Every structure is written in C-alpha cells, then in structure tokens.
Image: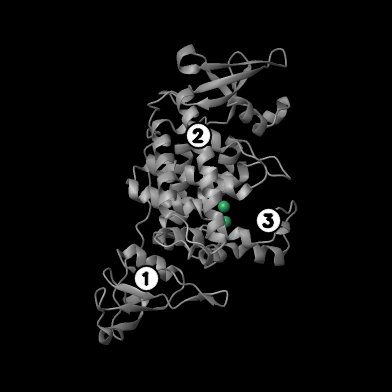
C-alpha cells in the first residue's frame, strides 16, 4: 500500500515511494529507496521535506494512528568526532613520490576524461555509468593511500578553463584524503568522493558571465549563482544508483555551520558530515585556485583563511582536523631554508617538519637557480619560515607546473 506519512515519523526500514517535494517549481524525482539508517532521515528532513509517500509492501509500515500522538525522537546526525590529538598525522608514503606521480598523471588524465564525459551525459539527460565514476574514485583513493602528495600536487595544476571540472576532481581528492586521515571505511569514503565529484554540476546551468565575473556579484547575480545547488540535484536525478549522500552533498555544500548558508540555512549538526567536509574542501580549493581573472592564494595563506572561517562557516573541530591533515608544510607551499635558499614543498617524509623540497631560488644572491630536489629529512636542513612567492617574483601556479614537468 502507498501511504503518505510525515517525515518525522519515518524509521529505518521504510521504503520511500515518492519524495513528494518540489524545488524551483518542478518536482525532483529521486530514486525510490529503502531508508537505511537514521542519518538518511535527518538528511531528508534537512531538505525541508515534510511528507513522503512510503510503500508498505516494499518496506516496513508506519502505524499512522500513532503519528498524531507523540512523535518519535529523531537522533541527530552523529557529530564529527573532535580530534584533540596533535600527534595525529597523515600516514607516511609507502611509495616514493616520483613513482606515484607517474601513475597519478595517468589517473588525472583519466579522471578528466571520465568526469568530463559523465558531466556531459548528466547535462544531456542521459544516464551516466555510475560504476565508472566509482571505479575512478577507488583508483584515486588507492593513489592517495600509496602517496597522498602525488595526486594532491597534480590536482593543484590545471588549465584556467574548465574550472568546474578540475575543481571537482580536486575537491574529491581532498575529501578522500580527509576520509583516509579520519580512517573512514572505504564505502563511506567513495560515496563522499563521488558526491564531491558532482557537487557543482548545476553550475552548467548558471550563465558564464556570472560564473566567471571577476568583480563582486550583484544581489541578483548571487541569487542566480545560489541556484546551482538545486540545479545540481535536478541534474543528478538522471544518474540512477547514486547514493543518497551524493544528492545531499550537492544540495548542502554551501550551508554554514552558523546557519547563515544556503539553500536551507541549516545549522550545526543538521548539516551532514559529507556536506560539512565537502564545504571545507570546496572553499580551500576555490581560494587557492588560479582563475582567469585572479591568481589563487598560496597554500598556507589558504589554510589561514580556512582557519578564520572555522569561527562561523565551518565545524571548528572538523576544520582543525582538515588543517592537520593538509599539514604544516603542505605540498605546494613555498618555504625558506636555513641557508636562505627558497623552495617549494613537493612531498612529505616520515618527519612532517622535514618534507621534500624543490629548491629554485637563492635568497643570498637574490636570483633563481637551477632547481634541485632536497629531502630535508636526509639532508638535515631545516625550514626557517614560509616564503611569499610574490615577494621573490614568482607565481605559485607556475611554480607547481614547473615542479612536475
Ligand atoms: Fe558550489
Ligand atoms: Fe565547488
């Protein structure tokens, strides 16, 4: 029997026949689905859906007589566990950077092809091969597990066009890196990574003049830009077999922890873990990316900005965990050594304070030198400070490209 029920009465085991919801004046038909857990109910409710239709022959029934009485308590989404362990660091690489970079280059070029093709299919209303996207996420996770620096370094280097495509792959890589850092199970990590790959798909429906506007958006333009989250869910309806989390990430990656985000103004732990994590990775990638109209922030400056935003935009504990995960000297950061030479961090070692640096500048003579690799953990050289690439006349984006050429 098909029954209309209030979402506060839903329970795991109910089968959703129809979400009975509409955004932008049209209905969004997300696949019929079995409610797996309480978290899924929280997500549905966070979408502002008050009532759904359930199929009592395909899942558990709800006693509708009881629904007028006391409402069952719904558990909140489990808050991300605050990590107060300063000693926790990403696992050291099991494969040398040079070896993994070769594999990661092929992986990145495959990722660009697969994501470009999938986005196109979704835009055209075709059903994309979700299995292919999962296989891609699995390969990205494997690469990050072998040596996280390789893929993260390569995703920092991109063409200035097709911003959304490269941004999606980068955000997904950052999400996978954090999932590894947090020790989340593979299934959960892959669902979040696929959600991150599609999080901005709705931007294809936003005019280019707004997407690439170098100046501040007007109120009307910002209103249009904000619609991309709902457009994303609209488009994703073509991709059957996507886990629920993917729709949620697409819809809620612009919610703010203080409730000032959009589209639903969700506050605190009402925002799912996947959406919270994608939001941090999304902003970090956006502010450190070079666009056709501006140079991106350096990695360390980007992290500082993320730290400032943890006061209101993001979950503080999760943000601090992200900063610990990215590291003291993240790949791509520019550093000054004790002999006043300057280099860019291209890889990590067992010692987080002594990464592998590509040295390219001599601060004593104020001139560029022929670049060479220096493993600080072996040479015993120390980093004395961060260096602002602009101060010595170089752009972070061009530095990175040179590093892996
Ligand atoms: Fe977005
Ligand atoms: Fe984004």
* Residue placed under numbered mark 1 in the picture: 32
Q: Residue at x 38, y 48 (%)?
A: 189
Q: Is residue 209 toward the left or the right of residue 249 in the image?
A: right
**Circles 2 and 1: CB atoms closer than 8 Å:** no
* Residue placed under numbered mark 3 in the picture: 211
- Mark 1: is the Cβ under 8 angstroms from ligand 1? no
Q: Residue at x 61, y 58 (%)?
A: 203
Label 2, label 3: how many angstroms apart (C-alpha)? 29 Å
* Residue placed under numbered mark 2 in the picture: 106
Q: Residue at x 46, y 46 (%)?
A: 175
Residue 119 position within the rendered picture, expressed as x and y whole percent measured from the top left: 55, 55
Name the N-terminal-most of marks 2 and 3.
2
Label 2, label 1: how many angstroms apart (C-alpha)? 37 Å
Residue 356 position within the rendered picture, expressed as x and y whole percent measured from the top left: 51, 21
Q: Quadrant of the N terminus?
A: bottom left
Residue 381 position within the rendered picture, expressed as x and y whole percent measured from the top left: 52, 14
**Residue 311: in sight, yes or no?**
no
Label 1, label 3: how many angstroms apart (C-alpha)? 33 Å
Query: Depth-wise, is mark 1 or mark 3 nearer the camera?
Result: 1
Name the N-terminal-most of marks 2 and 1.
1
Q: Between 289 and 162, which is closer to the camera in this rendering? A: 162
Give residue 144's quadrant in the image. top left
Q: Between 153 and 99, which is closer to the camera in this rendering? A: 99
Q: Is residue 397 toward the left or the right of residue 190 in the image?
A: right
Secondary-structure class at tag 2: helix
Q: Between 337 and 33, which is closer to the camera in this rendering? A: 33
Which image quadrant shows ligand 1?
bottom right
Neighbours of disc 2 within 10 Å: few (<14), some (14-19), many (20+): few
Secondary-structure class at tag 3: helix
Asked if residue 352 is positioned above or below residue 217 in the image, the reply reads above
Residue 131 position within the rendered picture, expressed as x and y whole percent measured from the top left: 40, 52
Secondary-structure class at tag 1: loop
């Amino acid at each position: 029997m098909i029954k209309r029920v209030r979402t506060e009465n839903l329970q795991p085991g109910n089968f959703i026949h129809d979400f009975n919801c509409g955004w932008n004046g049209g209905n969004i038909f997300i696949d019929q689905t079995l409610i797996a857990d309480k978290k899924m109910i929280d997500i549905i409710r966070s979408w502002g859906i008050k009532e759904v239709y359930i199929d009592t022959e395909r899942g558990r029934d709800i006693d509708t007589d009881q629904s007028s009485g006391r409402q069952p308590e719904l558990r909140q989404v489990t808050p991300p566990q605050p990590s107060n362990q300063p000693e926790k660091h990403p696992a050291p690489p099991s494969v040398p950077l040079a070896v993994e970079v070769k594999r990661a280059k092929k992986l990145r070029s495959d990722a660009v092809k697969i994501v470009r093709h999938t986005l196109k299919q979704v835009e055209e209303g075709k059903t994309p091969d979700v299995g292919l996207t999962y296989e891609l996420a699995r390969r990205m996770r494997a690469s990050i597990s072998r040596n996280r620096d390789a893929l993260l370094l390569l995703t920092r280097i991109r063409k200035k066009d097709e911003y959304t495509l490269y941004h999606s792959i980068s955000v997904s890589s950052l999400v996978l890196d954090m999932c590894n850092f947090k020790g989340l199970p593979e299934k959960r990590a892959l669902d979040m990574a696929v959600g991150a790959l599609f999080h901005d798909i709705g931007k294809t429906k936003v005019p280019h003049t707004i997407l690439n506007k170098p100046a501040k958006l007007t109120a009307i333009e910002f209103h249009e830009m904000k619609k991309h989250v709902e457009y994303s869910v609209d488009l994703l309806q073509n991709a059957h077999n996507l886990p629920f989390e993917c729709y949620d990430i697409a819809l809620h990656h612009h919610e703010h922890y203080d409730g000032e985000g959009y589209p639903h103004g969700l506050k605190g732990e009402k925002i799912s873990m996947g959406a919270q994590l994608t939001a941090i990775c999304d902003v970090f990638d956006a502010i450190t990316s070079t666009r056709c109209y501006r140079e991106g922030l350096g990695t360390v400056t980007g992290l500082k900005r993320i730290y400032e935003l943890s006061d209101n935009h993001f979950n503080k504990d999760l943000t601090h965990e992200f900063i610990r995960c990215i590291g003291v000297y993240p790949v791509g950061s520019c550093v000054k050594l004790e002999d006043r030479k300057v280099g860019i961090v291209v890889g990590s070692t067992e010692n987080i304070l002594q990464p592998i640096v590509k040295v390219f500048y001599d601060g004593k003579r104020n001139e560029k030198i022929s670049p060479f690799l220096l493993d600080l953990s072996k040479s015993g050289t120390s980093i004395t400070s961060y260096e602002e690439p602009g101060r010595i006349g170089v752009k972070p984006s061009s530095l990175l490209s040179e590093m892996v050429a």
